[in-house]
Amino acid sequence: MLFFFASCESTDAVESGTYTGTVDEVEAAKTEIYVKTDDGKTLELYFTEETSLSRAGETVDFSVLEEGMAVEVEVEKVGKRLDPISVEIME
């Protein structure tokens, strides 16, 4: 069990809710992002068909996401996984 935790990327478990932070990493091939929240947590978010991505109220494509962008994410905790409901680019 200890080996499993030691080999995983360092992400944090949080409750369902809305968080603000900065995109720390973009994994385009997996439609996945890592977000460093304003309170220092790292969230691992795999986009689903239902995830909405927008900037200034307009829907945008995943390809516009870049490291360093300020975002607000609404997530739902499903077991040990976080599903992003919406991601709003704040810039």
Image (cartoon, grey):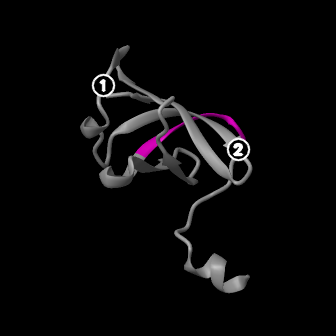
Residue farthest to the front?
49
The type of residue carrying mark 1 is Val
Nearest to the observer: residue 77 or residue 36: 77
Nearest to the observer: residue 51 or residue 71: 51
Residue 59 as seen in the image, left or right of residue 87: left
Q: Residue at x 73, y 82 (%)?
A: 1
Residue 56 is at least partly visible in this image = no
Can you give x and y, in whole percent of width and height, for residue 74 in the image?
57, 31
Q: Residue at x 56, y 73 (%)?
A: 8
Q: Which residue is mark 2?
A: 78
- CB atoms of marks 2 and 1 within 8 Å: no
Residue 8: assigned label: none
Q: Residue at x 74, y 50 (%)?
A: 79
Residue 23 as seen in the image, left or right of residue 21: left
Q: Earlier in the sequence, mark 2 or mark 1?
A: 1
Task: Magenta stretch: give its range.
Answer: 15-22
* Screen quadrant of the C terminus: top left
Badge 1 crowding class, 10 Å Cα cut-off, few under 14, some 14 to 19, many 20 or more, is some
Residue 41 is at least partly visible in this image = yes
Residue 60: assigned label: 1
Is 29 placed above or below 60 here?
below
CA gap, disc 2 to disc 1?
Answer: 25 Å
Q: Is residue 67 magenta?
A: no
The type of residue carrying mark 2 is Val
Residue farthest to the bottom?
3
Looking at the rendered structure, the secondary structure element under dot 2 is: strand
Can you give x and y, in whole percent of width and height, for residue 81 in the image?
65, 51
Can you give x and y, in whole percent of width and height, for residue 12 in the image?
63, 57
Can you give x and y, in whole percent of width and height, for residue 73 in the image?
52, 34
